[in-house]
Image: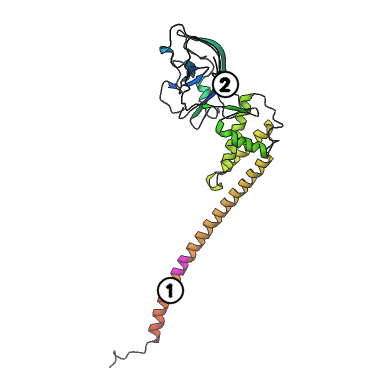
Amino acid sequence: MGKQQLAKKITWAIKNFSSSQTGKICSDQFVVGGCKWRLIVFPKGNNADYLFMYLEVADYESLSPGWRRHVCYLLNIVNQNAVKRSKQNEEQKWFDVRSPRWGRLSMFPLNEISARDSGFVVNGELRIVAEIEVLEVIGNFDVSEETSTLMETMDFNGFQLLPSQVGFVSHIFERHPEIASEMRLKNPNLRTGYMSLLLSLIETLRQSPHELHKTEIAEAFTVLRSMTDAGFKVDWLAKKLVELSEKKQKEEAGGTRMQEIKEELKSLKQKCLDLEVQLEDTKTEVSAAKAPLSFSDVF
């Protein structure tokens, strides 16, 4: 296969999955081992109560007769909760003109995938990770890499990261080299899930206290405890979270006091207006009292 990349790990984020009315969703094409592939899901099932998901040879109808591809692949529906297990299906299959796509249908019950707080669908988004290794190819290669919106991940200290995340995570490890020294999780998907959780938590803490609801801060404390239980050493992040919580409390207390002052000021302003009216009335009475008596009625 020459210099073709024989294995890749692809992340496919399906936005608006929970509201999708489409019967079939196809990913962009990507190239592994000199061959074009794509992922396919049926979000509403396919006459069954399961999420059907396949790995498919993208251009199989245009390939020369006799083509075959021997592939080891893993299809993984990511549980974004991180503390719960993801669902995955690992197989080793031959792809050919009679079987251009493969996937196990009974692995992903729709009621479990779509259940509220299950962790599989978060903010309407479902994430699928595919690990593909091409073992043998019979027939022609598709040699050109395709431009794709699918995200390839790379390993960094045992965590699978997007290329855009590597620089920031590297900086975290430089400042806090002990952060994962007591990490007890061995499952790579769970490790990566917790790292994504850490990055999301940092992004949350970067927001202004005004933009966050106190329930979000409470959830952040829950996430932080979960990460600590998993072996992350994040005392530095805990201090930031406490600081954010205190700022939020001061903001809310200050906001309440400001409202009280506004109400009090409004009352005082109304009282001032009433006093001004009384003053004008009194001025009129005093002016009348100062006027000399009139004798026009008796002369």
Q: Is residue 28 left or right of residue 188?
A: left
- In this view of the protein, can residue 254 be seen by the observer? yes
Q: Quadrant of the C terminus?
A: bottom left
In the rendered structure, which disc, 2 or 1, sits on the residue that comes first in sequence? 2
| Residue 278, label in figure | 1
**Crowding at label 2, few (<14), some or many (≥20) Cα neighbours within 10 Å?**
some
**Amino acid beneath label 2:** Lys
Q: Which residues are magenta?
A: 269-273
**Amino acid beneath label 1:** Gln
The residue closer to the viewer here, 188 or 82, is 188
Nearest-to-viewer mark from 2 and 1 = 2
Q: Is residue 288 left or right of residue 104?
A: left
Q: What is the distance, in whole Å, between disc 2 and disc 1 at their CAs?
A: 78 Å
Q: Does the stretch in magenta take in 274?
A: no
| Residue 66, label in figure | none
The residue closer to the viewer here, 228 or 252, is 228
Q: Quadrant of residue 170?
A: top right
Q: Is residue 295 left or right of residue 54?
A: left
> Where is 210 relative to 234, above or below?
below
Q: What's the residue at 56%, 31% (across, down)?
A: 163
Residue at the extreme bottom of the image, as rendered: 299
Query: Do the residues under discs 2 and 1 have CB atoms within 8 angstroms?
Result: no
Residue at the extreme left of the image, as rendered: 299
- List x then y, in percent, for residue 69: 51, 11
